[in-house]
Each structure stands twice: as structure tokens, then as C-alpha cells.
Amino acid sequence: LRHHVLPEIGDLPLPDVRARHLVDLFHKLRTDRKRNLAQRTIYNIYSVVSAMFRDAKLAGLIEQSPCVLDERQLGPLTDKDPEWRNDAVFARDEVETVISDARIPHDRQIVYGLELLAGVRPGETAALRWRHYDPTARPLGKLLVAKSYNTRKHREKSTKTDAVKHVPVHPVLAAMLAEWKLGGWAEMMGRAPTPDDLIVPLPPAAAERRRSRTGEPFRGHDYSGKRWREDDLPALGWRHRRHYDMRATFITLA
């Protein structure tokens, strides 16, 4: 809204916005060569506008929503680069490397293992505590994924879809978590973990450098994503991959 919508129609009262205003707005966004927005971004912007007018109608501020646009006005829902999705998935040998190679610090191997072998989102990984992991469940251990950490707002919240997920733990991930709990966690934090401790908190040195947030050392996506892009990916000598592609790999293989 702030970047794309309000600069164009923000001066109009809600009841005065018509479908033609939105047609003109999205035509301008789609043909703006300077911003060169992807089609998925166009649809994301429209979904926000549509939700705003839906809520305005429910609140009695307008009689009818002007959001009646479809593919004819918004364009096809396609990727900006049609080839990237095919190359986003990690191969099996790459997965093995990410979760075991000595060039990747132990704590980050655990983060990547949770995303690759349990399919949890980065924010969900950051909010996992030892009490959420039941290694005694059979035939596989179980992770309870009920919370997520919002990096932008610096707070714990529900999962993206508000769902509570019971995730079976792959035997390889179970072995990684057992080794991490018995040795790696205590080595990094200087004490043994308790049930309420985060499974993969920020390293103490990184937590001490924080300026805009206090409290528990949640490992936000800003930290994890930066470490992946600037340290781990170059150390492995691989082509560019998104940190989020680890969850995409899990989904694709599943």
C-alpha cells in the first residue's frame, strides 16, 4: 500500500474509488519499466488492495468493493524468470553437504536440517523450543510447530496459516538433534539446554550485537538469510540459491 498504491490513489476517499481507478493503477504498475515488477508482485499488491476494500465494506465504509479485476487487467500469474523455479530445488548430494559439511557451522547445519528435512519455515525454525520436540514418539519422533518468530516485528506469533503442525522427524534429523542437544548447544551457549530454551538460538556474540531488540535470542530470518548468502553459500562455492529454497526442496520432494 505504502509503496505502490497510496502514491497513486491515496488522496481519494474510500467511497470514491472506482474499478477504473484500479484498472489505471495496475496498468501503470505493470508497464513501469523502472520498477519492473514481477507478475507475482502485481498479484500480491492486488490481494492487499482487495483485502482492504473487503474490510472497508464489512465496516460499513463503502457499499461495494471496486476490486473486480481479473487476468485481463492484471496479466497472467507467471514467474519473472520462468527457469528459476526448476533450479531452486537442492539435489540429494547438496542436501547432504549443507547438513554435514565442516565448512558450515554446527548451529547453522541444524537450522538447514530443520528446513530441509522437516519443511518448517525460517520463522517457525526460530521459534522451536526443546519442549516442542518429542524424540520418544514412535515410529518417528515428532516436532510440534505452533509458533513463528516475526523478524520485522521482533515478536513470537502464530504460524503463517495459524495451523498447528505435528511434523514427523526424519531419522537423520533426529540424529542431528540428539548430537546438537548433547554437545553443540551447550558448547555454543555455555550451559545445558532446558525444555524452554530455543533449539537454535542466536550465538551469544551475535545476540550481544543486537541494537533494536531485547529479550530472548531469537534467530531471525535477517540473521539466517544473511549468513547463508554471505558466508555459507560462498564457502561451498555454489551458484545463488535462496535460503527459503530449503523448504521448497522439502515440499517438492514430498
Image: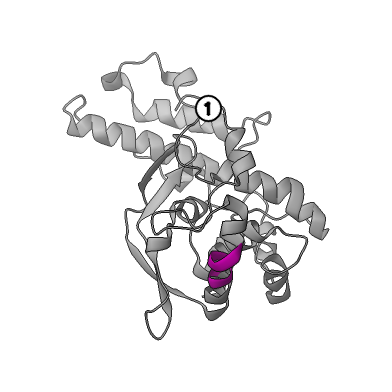
Tell me the chief SS of the magenta region. Answer: helix
Q: Residue at x 65, y 53 (%)?
A: 242
- Residues shaded magenta: 177-183
Residue that extends furthest to the left in the rendered view of this protein: 60
Query: Is 240 on the left or on the right of 54, as rendered?
Result: right
Q: Residues within 10 Å of mark 1 (few under 14, many from 20)?
A: few
Residue 162 position in % (x across, y down): 32, 53
For label 1, the residue is 212
Hey, which residue is sitting farthest front in the picture? 191
Is any part of residue 66 visible from this angle? no
Q: Examine the rendering and report whether any part of residue 69 can be seen.
A: yes
The extreme bottom residue here reads 139
Q: Secondary structure at mark 1?
A: loop
Residue at 52%, 51% in the rendered image: 77
Between 14 and 251, the one lying in front of the other is: 251
| Rendered residue at 49%/40% (across/down) | 151
Query: How far across and how far down the image is residue 252, in percent?
Result: 56, 70
Amino acid carrying label 1: it is Ser
Compared across the picture, whether 40 is left or right of 69 comes to right
Task: Name the residue located 47 percent from the left edge and 32 percent from the top edge.
Answer: 214
* Quadrant the N terminus occupies: top left
Residue 104: x and y in percent read: 73, 59
